[in-house]
Image (tube, coloured by chain):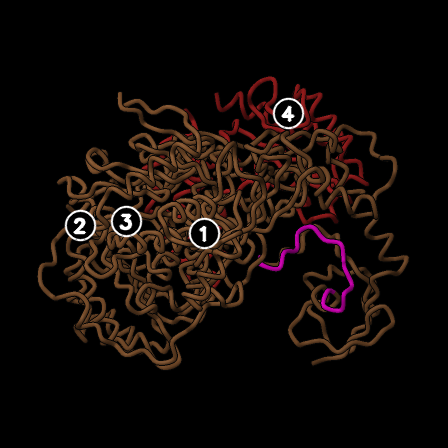
Amino acid sequence: MSENQQLPESFATELESLYRRLQPKYPSVGQNSAVLPLLHHAQQLCGGWLPKAAMDHVARLLDMAPIRVYEVVTFHTMFHTKPMPKHCVGVCTSLPCWLRGADKLMAHCRARLGVRHEEGISADDNVYLMEQECLGACVDAPLVTVDGVYHGRLDEEAVDKLLRSLREDNHVGS
Amino acid sequence: MMRIRIDGQDYHVDDGLTVFEACRRQGIEIPHFCYHERLAIAGNCRMCLVELDSSPKPIASCAMPAAEGMDIRTDSPMVKKARHGVMEFLLINHPLDCPICDQGGECDLQDQAMAYGRFHSRFDENKRAVAEKPFGPLIKSSMTRCIHCTRCVRFATEVAGIEDLGALGRGENVEIGTYVEKALTSELSGNMIDLCPVGALTSKPYAFKARSWELRKTDSIDVMDAVGSHIRLDSRGTEVMRVLPRRCDAINEEWISDKTRFAYDGLKLQRLDRPWLRHSDGVLRPSDWQTIEDVCVEKIKQTDGTRIAALAGELCDCESMFMLKELLDGVSCPHRDCRPFGTFLPWQERWQYLFNTTIAGIEEADACLLIGAYPRYEAALVEARLRKRYLQGGFQGRAFRVGTKLPAHWQIEDVGESPHSLTELADSGHRVAQAFKQAKKPMIIVGMGALQRSDSEAIWHHIMALVQAFGVIRDDWNGFNVLHTRASMVGGMDVGFVPSQGGEARKGIEERARQGSIDVLWLLGEDDVDEETLKKPFVIYQGHHGERGASAADVIVPVPAYSEKDALYMNMEGRLQRGLPAVPPLGQAKEDWRVLTDMANRLGQTWAYQSQRDARRAMQKAYPLFAEKIGNIAAKKEKIELSYRQNGHSDVLNDTPLHSPLVNYYQSNVIARASQTMGRCVSELGGAVATKEKAK
């Protein structure tokens, strides 16, 4: 089962060394704050998602109850608890982006990618489409992230271009 | 003190209060869901919004500290509108299925929706549905009804000490859960049902059984452990429908353990509802009161007093033990005991067998040593209090345990398993000795695991040496505590249900019975006896459940269970408490005082008790402790002279680790063993504490 996936070999040492670098940044009573950078790194090491073993590892490292880490992971849209396709497209649907037409972009992405539900994997299994909470860059609304990179002031045409580049990338990749 | 203005009126309130508490103390109720006075403040339901003159937006009063000169309005149009808005949002995803919800009639959301809800919903979209969560055999979940107040999460984390529950997801997708499928292993989990302000967590055994307004509520006292929790028995007709906690800050705060709450279905099963008599062919047959009393009286008359013995079980009340003791005195029988097999516990001075620090007093202690005591299983509310003390800080590195390493819900340092470690602790270089030396209010908790062994007398000697070396008993502080597991034990020792002059204790009684030198054995609700012991003597079983004791009995005398009688109990602190009957005795069962008075009179003792009250008065006359006000700790001794050398001796400690005598938390007494709910708990949650090892 993918949930019980083995962690990469270097996982423990890499996380440990990152934690050692982070430690001085936080006060002794606030060491738990390191949970976010550690999780980001863990997600990267695990290939774009966080298996339970990875979250438990972070919890042990910070001496937190595992449930507290699960809470953090499920709260943030940038963490994934299931294996992800190659690419991840997120459309911000918070208020300023919505005012600037985010739901039209979302519908457009859905149609283009062949995603039937609100969020999901594209028909060609290449892209995961999701809604995102406010990205903190409302000045460029509406925003779309592609694999973590922000693209702002978009219309349907610009989104098409982005999606096309992903598909081409896929062809190159495979 | 500071001055704040609430609804145009000036009040002086204590410093450090929140706006919510300040208002509440003036008698101004503010609607709320997530706030609970015994849990951390969360401020996430937003129902307690009030208006503050210096703030443009309404504020959440539960999370806002009150400050000098604040002008607060709790009844302005703005507040009303804000609360209406909050309520509308809370109800957006709420299924509004009150007619099929068990919380109906005692639901905070229902009540407050009456005050702040709209008559019709404006929400045309689909409501969300949430999958049920597996919360085990005791809690039924209906998570669609959840309003995410997080009271259950905070209770689990703070009070119960199981950090397994959390709020997962975000925004509209928040769900309460454990993420991984996991049973909640707490002995206090049932309290989440009471805490849940809506019908998301309800009682599984009580599901669809009754409505709150149909139930008659009786204040009573719990007998499932020696804590003596204050409970409310909710009954309908002749049936106890559920058990709920009552608030009592000195004992159980407002929690009760799962066994207390859920074992009530055992009151309906395996009950003795008529007298039984074993005929000459060896078969037990239903009988009648006249016959069995004749048989018992005749048997006792024929038997010499020294060949009669009596054992009292763990659910007995004080009056019945007192009366049986009087009856036995009347036939000059010295053999009787209310302590379990092999217990060494002196009764000459009251402090020697009490939880002297008191349960609330635990919060003052600054060092702690547990010796063969496992409060998590033996007295779950003492565990909750120890955890509360631990969370206050300063307990780390000052709490130790001698005994097997059973899991606890707070951090405790193990300093050895066998009683030999007791001798090491006294050494002044040992970290336990050092921690105790610095402590101002040190406490030692001695459990039954240390007192029910073949070497208990020697253990007692060493414990007393520690008590003296560590200065556990001081003029203003008594830190010596015995953690009892049986509700009847302190009361039994208080009424002298212990061997009198020339009498045998429990162990001796059992040995004599096996040898055949005890002819009549009277079991007052005692089931924890070997078959071997019950083979030879004529056994009178006076109790309410047909189990080991009754099945070996020659005469079965049916009497009411704790939910059916008005009786006094002493809890482990020596606190006098009174339980009241919620339902009448079952079938032909007769109250203990009636049975014993009839028998005594026919034995030629002239007791003129006309009622339970007469019997109680006689007991109060003989033991003034029981004349104390209900709820008080009776007769505290001013000055304690340590005379430990007279009790116990120093040789023969054996190597066996100190085990808990409890075999299983969920099935520790006859009622709990008869309960199907407790049976389900055992099969689904385990709950095993230790294997029974009798010191023989």
Q: Amino acid at mark 2?
A: Gly
Residue B15 x, y percent position in the rendering: 66, 76
In the image, what residue occupies the spot 75% across and 78% down?
B12
| Disc 3: host chain | B
Quadrant in the rendering for residue A143: top right
Q: Amino acid at mark 4?
A: Arg
Spatial CA distance of label 4 from label 2 is: 91 Å
Residue toward you, A90 or B650: B650
Residue B105 x, y percent position in the rendering: 73, 40
Judging by the rendered image, the residue that carries numbered circle 4 is A164
Categorize mark 2 by other alpha carbons within 10 Å: few (<14), some (14-19), many (20+): some
Categorize mark 4 by other alpha carbons within 10 Å: few (<14), some (14-19), many (20+): few
Kindly indicate whether the residue at mark 2 contacts the one at mark 1 (C-beta within 8 angstroms). no
Marker disc for residue B508: 2
Which one is closest to the eye, mark 1 or mark 3? 3
In the image, what residue occupies the spot 42% across and 57% down?
B382
